[in-house]
Image (cartoon, rainbow, N blue to C red):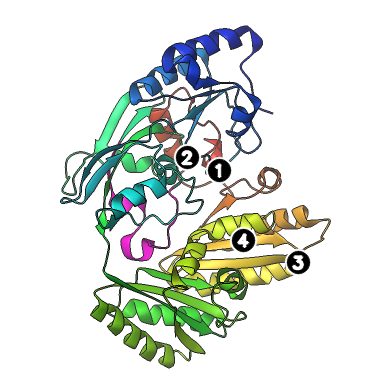
Amino acid sequence: MSHPIHSGLAQSAHMRLEGIVGAAHVLIGATDLASRQADGFLPSVVARPEDAAQIAEALRFAVTEHLAVIPSGGGTKLGIGLPPARYDIALDLSRMNRLLAYDPQDLTLGVEPGMKMEELLRILAEQKQFLPLAVPFSERATIGGIVAANSSSPLRHAYGGVRDFCLGMEFVTGEGIQAKSGGRVVKNVTGYDLHKLLIGSLGTLGVITRVNFRTYPMLPAQGTFVALFSDAAAAFGFCGAIARSVLVPQILEVADPAASRMLFSGGAERLEPGAWSVIISAAGQPAVVDRCARELGHMAGAANAEELIRLGEAEAPAILARIREFPRLILEAAPAAIFRIGVLPTAMASLLGELDALARQEQVDLITLARASGIIYAALLPKEGDPNGLAALANSVKRVFDACGKSEIGASAMLEFCPPELKRAARGAWGDSRKDFELMQRVKHSFDPHGVLSPGRFAGGI
């Protein structure tokens, strides 16, 4: 249950919100509230502002009345992080879905947080441009949620993460103050990059009202390749050889045998389902892609690959889409604990070996997909029919945090998706307390001194 607005305040709070965002945009129906649930917690009301001024006024009202506010767009990220300590107002930003500025010549744009990623990519495609944000739940995910969750994209291998092409941001602090950081052009050197603090903050520091991005031109040709290996060491050795070469692939992913079966089922039957798979996507002029194919062939042979296959034009888009949607595919299959782990590429094979060993000991299934530049998605699933599946998962989660915390591994683990009850049974979403927790508290107090924004959802219950 949530911590609802108490009955003596409910009517006055409702009327005050109607005065801020309009009566038609204050919702209290059961379906509306359920659509904004966060880890099983329901808000008391949904408010749908249309601009930054309304957000600022709503937050000032929340401060006055000691109410907790959680912003969201498509609702795909509300299960990330810890369960909220309080939850009174769901701030639905879906009305703020406009493209505010777009200069194809300068490769820059400004967009409101409620725009869906698919719609923005469609607009950019008309100018033969794109954003390197191939994120899961693509049909519902919005710009604000993607930024606030720092969603990982397989394209990060070539283009980096959100921080690398986010030029600036406008936002509203927990005190209802409208602020901005960064700029609207690529050459921006004035001031501090305060907006980067909001990337990955899960709405605990401010409500994003505008994001400025650098865009990228679409390249004329693309080739997608799959190299098959008998074990993880050989697969990651091949990735290391690519990293040391002149090749700069757009995508470089390593799927374990279970993930390979999931990615290639129904899409590329000619791929060996029991192998470790390295998926490489290269783009550029046709001659560049052809050279990449030749170089990959030489390197695959030197790495003792079982096979190197170039996917056909009909095969590649479906498989790349399944890579993008990997977390969603897992969650649709069964209740699961899905970790997003940051780790040095040189430690990936070792960490995956530890995860495989503990999964066998705890008798849970493990499925992994690694971004060779430093991200591992590791999904733990209960054995089919196991009545103690949740307990086994909870114990496995604790051991994953322990494995990642070893000094020789030096990984940073986040439990990105899992059933709410699992977070309570394990160590939350980030494991034990972080060394920088005191600094994080000070940052939170600077942006949100009254604790009205998504209280309790970030590391340490911030």
In the rendered structure, which segment of residues is drawn in magenta?
Answer: 150-169
Q: Position of residue 97 (x, y in %)?
A: 37, 35
**Nearest the eye: 181 or 285:** 285
Q: Which residue is mark 1?
A: 81
Distance from Cα at disc 3 to Cα at disc 1 = 26 Å
Give the mark nearest the N terminus, 1 or 2.
Answer: 1
Could you say whether the residue bearing mark 1 is in a helix, strand or loop?
A: loop
Q: Which residue is mark 4?
A: 379
Query: What residue is rendered at 36% in x and 55% in y?
Result: 161
Give the mark nearest the N terminus, 3 or 4.
Answer: 3
Give the mark nearest the N terminus, 4 or 2.
Answer: 2
Q: Which residue is mark 2?
A: 202
Query: What residue is rendered at 40% in x and 35% in y?
Result: 443
**Do the residues bearing badges 1 and 2 touch, measured as CB atoms within 8 Å?**
yes
Q: Is residue 269 magenta?
A: no
Q: Is residue 327 above or below residue 346?
A: above
Outermost residue toward the right in this view: 387
**Do the residues bearing badges 4 and 1 touch, measured as CB atoms within 8 Å?**
no
Could you say whether the residue bearing mark 3 is in a helix, strand or loop?
A: loop
**Nearest the eye: 60 or 458:** 60
Q: Which mark is residue 363?
A: 3
Quadrant in which residue 201 is drawn: top left
Q: Is residue 326 above or below residue 360?
A: above
**Do the residues bearing badges 4 and 2 touch, measured as CB atoms within 8 Å?**
no
**Do the residues bearing badges 3 and 4 touch, measured as CB atoms within 8 Å?**
no
Q: Amino acid at mark 2?
A: Leu
* Neighbours of disc 3 within 10 Å: few (<14), some (14-19), many (20+): some
**Left or right of 291 on screen, residue 40:** right
Q: Position of residue 221 (x, y in %)?
A: 29, 72
**Left or right of 133 on screen, residue 124:** left
